[in-house]
Amino acid sequence: MLPFARISIIGLGLIGSSIARAVRQYMPTARLTGHDADPAVRDTAKRLDLCDDVTDTPGAAVIDADLVILCVPVGAMGALAEAIAADLPADAVVSDVGSSKAGVAAALKAALPHATIIPAHPVAGTENSGPEAGFATLFQKRWCILTPADDADAAAVARVEAFWRALGANVETMAPDHHDLVLAVTSHLPHLIAYTIVGTASDLEAVTRSEVIKYSAGGFRDFTRIAASDPVMWRDVFIANKDAVLDMLQRFSEDLTALQRAIRWGDGDALHDLFSRTRAIRRSIIEEGQDDERPDFGRSHE
Ligand code: NAP
């Protein structure tokens, strides 16, 4: 039995269109309705046949849904929830895929005080955006973190969990604040560092732009992939998860200062200890199937 039969996806970019494709593949009998604020995205969604129906307004997309998933930037979630409030069926479950959770949960609760809201964050993505960037297997073996409120309806949580498992994800439940702290260090801070490094390199006068590009395989290239992520999405994440990001940034700055000192004093043992610990973390990530161990991350060199 399907956990949901009439699924509505609002925001048909990378994540929304990937969910649509995955629902088509793994729950082919579910009815899919989609909406996006951008008429060009709606046209592309129709052309790609992502949904059974693509509506011109968010309200029309939810009118008979039993699951509504909001897949827009986190700063747009509250206004979108207000826009669907009048048309949302009383028994529908509302979820979202936002990369930060506490602020989004508060915005959804304020806009939809009587709705069943089960927030989620699929920890899967790429640096690409838009409906053409999505693919059905994006969530396979990736974690999806549910952050239901303490008093959330247990049956609704179980249905949302079953939904994500059907799409191939592993599911974990966490308090929203804890989610925001964990993701601040595993995702938000690395993005901030990548944005900084790529920005610094592009501002250097002593090194030409063509040298930066030519010799990028020395490590820089992997930062540029992260730093190519969607500017609107990431602007909203840093504003929404400000406290946890600033906490982690403070901690990071202290550790960076310690590393600076070790280099200044030629403390090879301290450097070697740290680099050995970090190498072990990389091995654990590969052992848990969360990344590719092929040389050069499986890049094609043809
Ligand atoms: P995306 O590819 O840029 O898609 C977002 C889509 O939502 C765009 O087409 C956008 O249209 C549309 N939109 C914006 N405001 C809207 C509104 N009020 N009503 C309807 N549509 C609206 O972004 P994404 O990467 O799929 O990210 C979507 C959400 O997933 C974000 O909350 C993000 O934090 C979360 N997430 C992303 C990743 C990732 O790696 N990318 C991973 C996990 C979770 P316009 O272009 O016209 O604004």
Image (tube, rainbow, N blue to C red):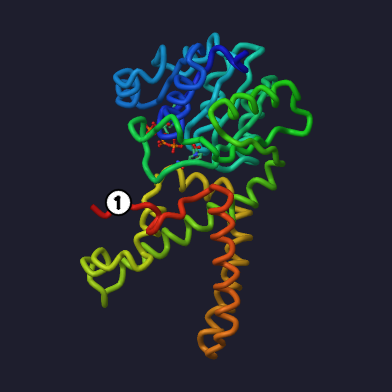
Q: Amino acid at mark 1?
A: Ser
Left/right placement of residue 176 relative to residue 2 reads: right
292 is higher (above) or lower (below) than 144? below
In the image, 86 versus 232, the foreground residue is 232
In the image, 81 versus 66, the foreground residue is 66
241 is higher (above) or lower (below) than 135? below
Q: Residue furthest top?
A: 64
- The number of numbered discs placed on residues in the rendered structure image is 1
Residue drawn at the location 56% of the way across and 23% of the way down = 82
- What x and y, as percent, mark residue 234? 46, 47
- What x and y, as percent, mark residue 283? 55, 59
63 is higher (above) or lower (below) than 234? above
179 is higher (above) or lower (below) than 91? below
* Classed neighbour count for the residue bearing mark 1: other residues with Cα under 10 Å, few (<14), some (14–19), many (≥20): few
Q: Quadrant of residue 213?
A: bottom left
Can you identify the residue that label 1 sits on? 300
